[in-house]
Image (spheres, rainbow, N blue to C red):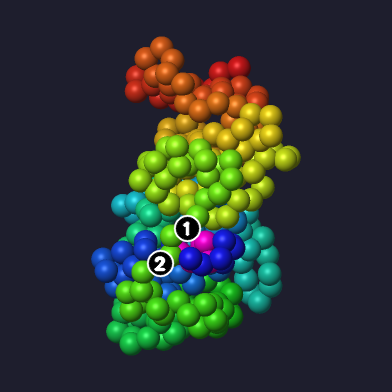
């Protein structure tokens, strides 16, 4: 099994999804992986952790077949040779899988990138999409190629299977009690990292998170409650870490947090409660 590091965890989590995108849309899995690494900071960016978005695809009148929302965040661009930070709207998703597949769909169905699909190597594919206008960083293609070659990502283009991604300690115990990789959370997509409040810890999964605090233990946040929590930084700041899992309540479910609760039912949707 690969060492439990940020690098190996992210690569092995994303590789099967990148291979699925390669099969459906023809984007080399190695390029998808390299772009996800570069644009999400190995899954550590705010957009990836809370928007399930790993490529920074901008929102427009066409959000594509996979995105469910748009989120507004600062982003770094190179404009007229100058590094600047601007506010922009980005596509967000229910899952990492949807983000990966939307990336493939975006490239395959955008005519400006058509030439890339006539290339014969991931390196030339990376150069072609950059030449067509993907990313303003003048070193973007070179950075992708360095990631592909240094991490031997081409092995996934050839169909190599990814290693199992481990989840350990208290968060791992909760994950396994839910069914592990067969649970609705799916596979882990990052190692344990800082959570939403001081002292908390978090592991991101394909469709949600598990957050741990020393006072309240580890609890999963997923589904409609996760959507309400993750897409609004003010809500995350107000609520903090979860103090319970989802609990049946009235005709729906409720989940308690340090600063309040989120209630959900099919009839009312999600509601914040004190």
Residue at the top extreme?
A: 250
Mark 1: few/some/many CA within 10 Å (<14, 14-19, 20+)? many
Q: Nearer the viewer, residue 190 or 123?
A: 190
Q: Which mark is on residue 165?
A: 1
Residue 89 sits above or below residue 171 on the image: below
Secondary structure beneath dot 2 equals loop
Q: Is residue 192 left or right of residue 99?
A: right
Residue at the right extreme?
A: 198
Residue 13, percent across and down? 45, 60
Name the quadrant of the C terminus: top right
Task: Kindly check if marks 2 and 1 are in contact, taking CB atoms under 8 A apart as contact.
Answer: yes
Residue at the left extreme?
A: 24
Secondary structure beneath dot 1 equals loop
Residue at the image point whose x is 37% and y is 61% from the top: 17
Is residue 9 one of those drawn in magenta?
yes
Res. 32 visible in picture? yes
Residue 175 sits above or below residue 59 on the image: above
Residue 253, percent across and down? 43, 21
Residue 41, percent across and down? 59, 63
Magenta span dominant secondary structure: helix
Residue at the image point whose x is 36% and y is 74% from the top: 160
Residue at image mark 2: 162
Residue at the image point whose x is 60% and y is 51% from the top: 192
Q: Nearer the viewer, residue 163 or 148?
A: 163
Is residue 241 one of those drawn in magenta?
no
Q: Which mark is on residue 33?
A: none
Kindly indicate the quadrant of the structure image that contains residue 240.
top right
Q: Which residues are magenta?
A: 8-12
Residue 259, percent across and down? 65, 24
């Amino acid at each position: 099994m690969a060492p439990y590091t940020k690098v190996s965890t992210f690569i092995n989590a994303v590789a099967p999804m990148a291979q699925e995108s390669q099969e459906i849309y023809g984007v080399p899995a190695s390029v998808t992986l390299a772009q996800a690494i570069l644009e999400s900071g190995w899954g550590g960016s705010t957009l990836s952790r809370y928007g399930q978005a790993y490529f920074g695809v901008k929102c427009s009148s066409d959000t594509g077949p996979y995105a469910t929302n748009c989120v507004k965040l600062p982003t770094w661009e190179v404009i007229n040779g100058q590094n600047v930070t601007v506010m922009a709207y980005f596509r967000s998703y229910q899952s990492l899988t949807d983000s990966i597949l939307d990336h493939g769909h975006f490239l395959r169905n955008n005519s400006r990138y058509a030439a890339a699909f006539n290339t014969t190597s991931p390196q030339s594919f990376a150069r072609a999409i950059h030449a067509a206008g993907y990313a303003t960083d003048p070193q973007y293609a070179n950075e992708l190629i360095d990631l592909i070659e240094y991490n031997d990502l081409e092995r996934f283009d050839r169909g190599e299977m990814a290693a199992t991604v481990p989840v350990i300690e208290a968060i791992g115990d909760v994950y396994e009690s839910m069914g592990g990789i067969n649970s609705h959370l799916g596979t882990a997509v990052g190692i344990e990292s800082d959570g939403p409040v001081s002292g908390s810890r978090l592991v991101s999964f394909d469709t949600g998170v598990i957050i741990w605090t020393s006072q309240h233990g580890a609890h999963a946040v997923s589904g409609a409650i996760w959507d309400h929590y993750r897409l609004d930084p003010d809500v995350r700041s107000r609520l903090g870490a979860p103090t319970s899992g989802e609990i049946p309540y009235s005709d729906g479910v409720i989940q308690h947090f340090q600063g309040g609760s989120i209630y959900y039912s099919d009839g009312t949707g999600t509601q914040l409660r004190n």
